[in-house]
Image (cartoon, rainbow, N blue to C red):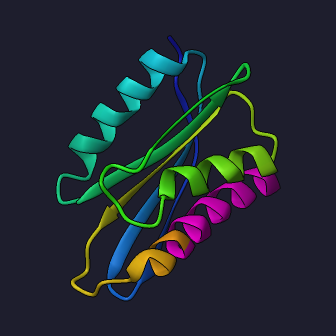
Amino acid sequence: MSVEEVFAGKIVDRKSKFYAHLYKIDNLDSDVEQIQKTHNKKYKKAAHHCYAALIDNQEDSRNDGEVGSPGRVLLELLHEYQLDGYMIMVSRIFGGIKLGQGGVARAFRTAGRGVIEAYLQNK
């Protein structure tokens, strides 16, 4: 089992904070579980920890009760950038202002795309 965080970033949208982390992974099940535990400890105030993972034609995503299907949005980004063997996790700390389904999806997409593009530019 080998998990490597390759990049992290943060965006703020109407007082909600979105912490995005991009990881290289070797195993879908065990690595996802390990990263979830890490984020649960690191971002205790986060209402949602949403992710997508893609490895060897296997994929997984999780919305964690969040509206706007952020797991699907993040999975689309992994496919768009052809990031096989990677996982992206975004933890959201609610800022008190509801963003709606579209706003939530846009914020997760922006956070995910930002961390992916920053990683690819610095690779």
Magenta residues (range): 106-123
* Quadrant position of the C terminus in the picture: top right
Q: Using the image, determine if residue 86 lies above or below residue 28.
A: below
Residue 70: x and y in percent read 49, 58
Residue 29: x and y in percent read 46, 18
The image quadrant of residue 111 is: bottom right
Q: Using the image, determine if residue 15 lies above or below residue 107.
A: below
Q: Residue 86: within the magenta?
A: no
Closest to the observer, 82 or 68? 68
The image quadrant of residue 23 is: top right
Give me the residue at 21% from left, 41% from top: 41
Is residue 35 rendered to the left or right of residue 98? right
Is residue 74 rendered to the left or right of residue 81? left
Q: Using the image, determine if residue 29 lies above or below residue 18.
A: above
Give me the residue at 51% from left, 73% from top: 107
Give me the residue at 43% from left, 83% from top: 13
